[in-house]
Amino acid sequence: MTAGPLDRLFATDAPPDAGVAALLDALPGGVGLFGIDGTLRFANRAYLELAGEPAGATTQELLARTPPEDRDEVAGFWSRFFSDDTPSAEREMRARTSDGTEVWVTEQARKVFGADGRPVGVVMSWVDVTATKRAEAAAADAGRYFEALMARSSDFVTVLEVDGSWRSSSESAARVLGYPRGFDPAGGVFSLVHPDDLPRALDGFARVLDGEDFVGAPLELRIRDVHGEWRRLELVAANQVDDPIVRGVVINARDVTARREAEERLAVSEARYRDLVELMDEGVWVTDAQGATTYVNPRMAAMLSMPAAAMIGTPVADYLDGESLAALLDWRARWVAGLAERHDLRFRRADGAWVWASLTTTVVFADGRPHTVIAVVSDISDRKVLEAELEAARVRAEAASEAKTAMVGRISHELRTPLHTILASLELIPPAETTDRHVARAASAAGHLLDLVGDLLDVARIGSRDLGLEREPVGVDSVLDAAVGLANLDGDRIVRTGVDGCRVLVDERRTIQVLVNLLANAAEHAPPGTAVTVDRRVVGDRIEITVADLGPGLDPAVRDRVFEPLVTGSGDEGGVGLGLAISRGLAEAMGGTLVAVDRPVGAAFVLGLPAVVTVADGPDARRVLYVEDDAMNVELVERILASRPGIELRVERTVAAGIAAVRADPPDVVLLDLHLPDGTGFDVIAALADDPRTAAVPVVVVTADATARTATAVAGVGAGCLTKPFTIADLFAVIDAPDGSGSRSGVASTGSGLRKDHLEDRTVG
């Protein structure tokens, strides 16, 4: 700066006059006047605010305001500027104000020369650029943040020049396609496009250059990666050529290769299964929850002589007769409750003819409610015709059997009268030495005929189911004692083993008759000096009595027919072969069984009779609490449990009532719904788990939610889970299990009991 008014400011130590000082204070930037020795001669208001130093301060004092890491650089700048011939210099620097605030300033220094051309001072101006620097730093941080996001994003951004050359891409592009950043293929970026997709790619690029963005309409292209494989990319583009920063076409790309391959595999799988369904020999009928048809396969349409398309949207009820429709409506109520069943229904064909079909259904639930019903339908019309023919044949056979039985009964009755007369007359003949032997023989023969007539009458009664049985609890030992006496057997020859004190529910007289036959046969065929063994065992709900001997055993030629009338087990000519046939008929009429079993030596017959089990001690005695507010579900469970005696069912409809009922009288098992008016099933479980009196009570959650999340939540709190649809056998399995766990596929084990520590943050699925 040449000599002039300013050089006169440095000629003396006096401050500028008031006019000059006011002018300098009015400047927006800071201005400081330094002597050539580095002493601050004058500073305007803005400079003092930035530097925080008064007039008279030296450059060393100003240097103290500089951050320590910048001081060497600032000192070097000042040293060079004051020692060389440079007239001016400019730079950005950091400084601290008097209160310690860090600011950024643009510093301009100009030397003032005296009349002799030598420097006499320096004019230093500072402009605060802190806001600008902070904005630049924020922009840089945002840029780095955006780059970091893009580097980790599954999408990538590419910028193309207007000529189609590849300017830049985000880091994720290298991960997807394998090309390094900055890669520009020799043939241009469009050389990487699949030949079949190239026309669409060029057309799309041209339209973008014309201003038509396809942000809302993605373009899918196949792009070759670094390995030569084709990747499917979904692209959206925007023309940013006029943007001064971008100056190009911005393309956002997403790799959809895996999704497309999965969709193609799914389409192939769906086509395969659809083909299987289309080619099935069984009909497939799909409806919504209201029974409207949504799909039928060709076999189903052919079964009803209807075009498949014409059946879509029509209710299943339109094809049923009245009886089948009533059965279907009752059946649908059980579908909603989750029971799986099979039914025979009669459908009307398009030509008016009727076809019988058997339906097996699967119910698909969504959000805990029935959504879709899938039925596999089998045409059983031929079977129904055969069943009708068999039923007619059965009726004819029963009529013939009844006629035969009636005839045998009449003949037996007519034979018994003269036989009684003969026997009575023989008893009236006076004893005579010459006639006693003949009379005894005649009496024996007549008695045998009377027994035979009695057997024939029993055969007739068994055939007509007219035995007049009176079933009552009877001790096994007492009927054995009576049978041994009536069979005229030596009690020492009978060896009893097994369980004493068993009781059976039978007709006492007929049971003795069966045992007399079995004991007499065994004694007759047992070798002299050998015993007849009678073993008594409890097998489930039955008492099995096994009568065995050490005789020749059953003739292999007749073993399989030994219980048929007129067949003898020994193969000899003795007897007429009615005893075992009558014995089995009587056993079965009393709800029992009679079978022959193979033995290495001798013969054995096992008589199985219903055991007497009191309800209080039996396996069927169970007390069940059902906590459920849905009336239809309650009615269904009531109907099922009512089918088996000994089960006491109590129903509560709220969380509070259910908890109170268990605490007042703990049941054997609790059936629990998850959705209740005043809370959830987990609230019930939490309360029971928290009470030592109820923590051990088995709880089984009954739900239509088959998701793994709900099953895991239920198992986690120590409860069982019965998932709809379930069968009646499934329900009885969880009720009969000691811990409520059951053993079927629809039932999850309850573990060792309710656990409160797993109940936090449970939500109903």
Image (cartoon, helix red, strand yellow):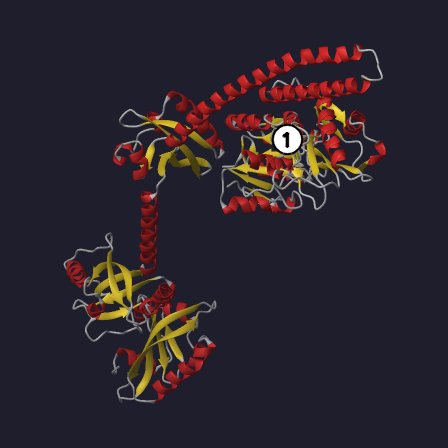
| Left or right, residue 718 beside residue 40 | right
Q: In this view of the protein, which residue sits in the foreground, 94 or 626?
A: 626
Name the residue furthest front. Answer: 434
Q: In this view of the protein, which residue sits in the foreground, 334 or 442?
A: 442
Residue 101 picture location, percent across and down: 45, 67
Residue 307 picture location, percent across and down: 25, 34
Identify the residue at horizontal 72%, vertical 39% (top origin): 692
| Left or right, residue 171 beside residue 631 | left
Give the quadrant of residue 292. top left
Q: In this view of the protein, which residue sits in the foreground, 54 or 541?
A: 541
| Left or right, residue 304 beside residue 69 | left
The quadrant of the picture occupied by the N terminus is bottom left
Q: Does 58 sit above or below residue 252?
A: below
Give the quadrant of residue 537. top right
Identify the residue at horizontal 58%, vertical 29% (top origin): 654
Q: In this view of the protein, which residue sits in the foreground, 497 or 201?
A: 497
Q: Give the total number of marks visible in the rendering.
A: 1
Q: Does 6 sit above or below residue 338?
A: below
Residue pointed to by mark 1: 624
Other-residue count near label 1 (Cα within 10 Å), few / some / many at <14 / 14–19 / ≥20: some
Identify the residue at horizontal 38%, vertical 83% (top origin): 78
Q: Amino acid at mark 1?
A: Val
Residue 328 picture location, percent across and down: 42, 27
Residue 527 picture location, percent across and down: 78, 40
Is residue 597 visible in the rendered image? The answer is yes
| Left or right, residue 522 beside residue 157 | right
Is residue 613 visible in the rendered image? The answer is no
| Secondary element type, mark 1 | strand
